[in-house]
Amino acid sequence: MILNMFNPLTNSIIMKSKQLSSYSKTGYSEVDKTIRLNKFLSNAGICSRREADEFIKMGLVQINGKIITEMGYQVKSNDEVKYDGSRVQKSPPTYLLLNKPKGFVATSQGGKINKSVQDLIRSGLKTKVLPIGDMGRPMTGLLLFTNDELLRKKLKNSSRVSMIYQVLTDQNITKGMMDKLKDGQMVFEKIQKVTSISFIQGKSKKEVGVEVHSLSPSVMFKLFATIGLKILQMDRVTYGGLTKKDLPRGKWRKLNSKEIGFMNMIP
């Protein structure tokens, strides 16, 4: 029996077959380039699909500036999706750790920058991933990169990110100076202080190890300057529990799932 090409049932079966075969591995339909909102959030690493449904019901998800509470909403490839106020990437976020060498700069300023830290990681990435915080050319050490906007926002606003700096100054550091740094000094209209500071075995009295919480390099330079010390060299040797182990200067690596989980646990 020959099927009538105008038979409604036959046409319906053919159409559904084409629709099923038109979905790519990413979940987007190749026909209309859409994906269910809960799958979009799941693909981005935000949460599971079931959790996404709850977040959508709670009004935590926006598309192009509009709160969406509709189950099954289809996201277009050019839509801007935000969760809890932060932009969501279309694919699982990237997390990189760089051991920055001297001479390169990390800055939030736009425009063309000579010897940017982006030059050190660009060859291994398809998309641009920005560093968290600035780091000047003279400074070396650990610098975290991610396009996970939720984590970026958390780390920028947190006062609990543990860091250790190795600092070389222009003169010998006294116990009195150390006490002043631990007591705190006014920097950028706020009292800033170090958690602990000590001399490094085998080094001169000009070189110290400093533990702080969420103090940027620029704040460190200003803090030491308030007590008459000029920082000549500074190296960040730990960042939020991440270390330079097996990471030579100028090289970078991706964070593993355990490290990513730990960073997300920082309050």
Image (cartoon, rainbow, N blue to C red):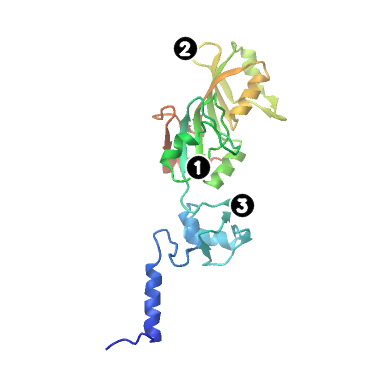
> Label 3 belongs to which residue?
85
**Farthest-out residue, bottom:** 1
Q: Residue sitting at 46 percent across and 44 percent down?
A: 94
Dot 2, how many residues are within 10 Å of its Cα: few (below 14), some (14-19), or many (20+)? Answer: few
The residue identified by callout 2 is: 202
Q: Is residue 179 left or right of residue 251?
A: right
Q: Is the residue 30 above or below the residue 234 in the image?
A: below
Q: Amino acid at mark 2?
A: Gly
* Residue where numbered disc 1 is placed: 129
| Residue 55 versus residue 156 in the image, above or below | below
Measure the C-alpha gap from mark 2 to mark 3. Answer: 49 Å
- Gap in Å between the C-alphas at discs 1 and 3? 19 Å
Residue at the (55%, 46%) spot, across then down: 149
88 vs 203, nearest the viewer? 88
Q: Position of residue 178 (x, y in %)?
A: 62, 17
N-term-proximal mark, 2 vs 1: 1
